[in-house]
């Protein structure tokens, strides 16, 4: 069975490396990293990952705007957002874009993995 | 928000996140870092809560936080600043999330900036309030000023 593919969009090498380590130990494959929103939008078109893990606070286009563009270009894009900013207003904003999950930084690995599993099942049920 | 509330929220954020990311205990102290060796980071909150947060770190603490975040892996000097930016982003995001929930409105953080020259970062403005938090750790000092 093919592995679920993931693209990470985060300007922090700390987050990117931690995500790679934890998800690859658990059967996912990270197929691309982008350091900002612009790069992430281009990379998505090339790689078509199953799931995008997207940071909110980034230089240039932030994660919220990036998610909006990704969803506009591909309404089926499956996105999980990560941020140190996890208040009720930010969560509402994330949901208004059509993204269900916002994981707080620093994250708990089991929360990250459980959320990925939910997204994976959601994608499979849409096929 | 009162000075006391802002102080408590940022104190909780620095103590909790530094403990979690770098396994460093922060003990409050009265004095800031005297002139000399220090690395200075800055990040701003914009929106319902407007603030400018300046964080001064002893070089040994700076290196230690990065060491713990990379789990001891060697990284190029130029990449170090990206790790410390993420540290400041996570600490201040943690604090701002609580403030946003308290105030019932959205504020966003800018991308952090680190440098060696305080003058390029912050000029106090008239009428601005300032909360200062000074910490001692086993590796050196962390001093935080929140202007809002």
Image (spheres, coloured by chain):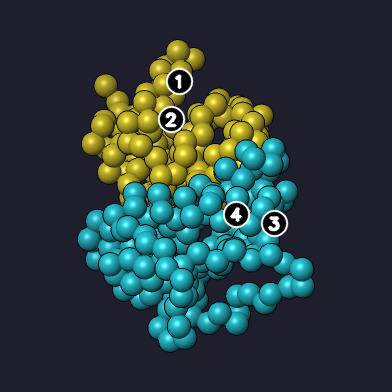
Chain colours: A yellow, B cyan
Q: Pointers 1 and 2 in contact (CB under 8 A)?
A: yes
Label 2 and label 3 in one chain:
no
Name the residue beneath numbered marker 4.
B4
Task: Tell which subunit mark 1 falls on.
Answer: A
Q: Which of the two residues, A33 or A16, is positioned nearer the viewer here?
A: A16
Label 4 and label 2 in one chain:
no
Report, in whole angstroms, how far the alpha carbon at label 2 lies from the one at label 3.
38 Å
Name the residue beneath numbered marker 3.
B50
Disc assigned to residue A123 = 1
Residue at image position (56%, 59%) is B111
Label 3 and label 1 in one chain:
no
Front of the two marks 1 and 4: 4
Residue at image position (44%, 32%) is A51
A45 displayed left or right of B80: right
Report, in whole angstroms, how far the alpha carbon at label 4 lies from the one at label 3.
17 Å
Report, in whole angstroms, how far the alpha carbon at label 3 lies from the one at label 1.
40 Å
Q: Position of residue A125 (x, y in %)?
A: 45, 13
B25 displayed left or right of B109: left
Judged from this view, the residue extending furthest toward the bottom is: B36
B10 displayed left or right of B68: right
Query: Quick one: quadrant of the C terminus of chain B?
Result: bottom right
Label 1 and label 2 in one chain:
yes
Q: Pointers 3 and 1 in contact (CB under 8 A)?
A: no
Report, in whole angstroms, how far the alpha carbon at label 4 lies from the one at label 2.
46 Å
Label 3 secondary element: loop
Label 4 and label 3 in one chain:
yes
Disc assigned to residue A50 = 2
Q: Position of residue A126 (x, y in %)?
A: 49, 15
Q: Is residue B140 visible?
A: yes
Q: Where is residue A29 in the image (x, y as percent from the top left)?
A: 31, 36
């Amino acid at each position: 069975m093919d592995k679920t593919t993931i693209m990470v969009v985060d300007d922090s090498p700390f987050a990117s490396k931690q995500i790679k380590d934890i998800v690859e130990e658990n059967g996912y494959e990270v197929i691309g990293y982008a350091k900002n929103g612009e790069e992430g939008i281009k990379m998505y078109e090339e790689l078509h990952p199953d799931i995008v893990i997207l940071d909110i606070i980034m230089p240039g286009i932030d994660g919220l705007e990036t998610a909006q563009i990704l969803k506009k270009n591909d309404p089926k894009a499956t996105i999980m957002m990560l941020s140190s900013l996890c208040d009720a207003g930010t969560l509402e904003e994330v949901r208004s874009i059509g993204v269900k999950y916002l994981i707080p930084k620093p994250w708990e690995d089991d929360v990250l993995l459980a959320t990925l599993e939910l997204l994976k099942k959601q994608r499979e049920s849409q096929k | 928000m009162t000075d006391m509330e802002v102080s408590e929220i940022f104190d909780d954020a620095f103590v909790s996140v530094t403990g979690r990311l770098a396994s460093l205990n922060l003990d409050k102290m009265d004095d800031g870092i005297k002139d000399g060796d220090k690395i200075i980071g800055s990040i701003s909150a914009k929106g319902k809560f407007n603030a400018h947060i300046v964080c001064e770190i002893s070089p040994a603490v700076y290196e230690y936080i990065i060491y713990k975040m990379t789990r001891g892996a060697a990284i190029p000097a130029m990449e170090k600043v990206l790790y410390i930016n993420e540290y400041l982003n996570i600490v201040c995001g943690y604090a701002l999330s609580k403030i946003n929930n308290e105030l019932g409105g959205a504020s966003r953080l800018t991308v952090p900036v680190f440098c060696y020259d305080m003058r390029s970062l912050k000029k106090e403005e008239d009428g601005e309030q300032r909360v200062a938090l000074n910490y001692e750790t086993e590796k050196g000092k962390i001093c935080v000023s929140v202007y809002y």
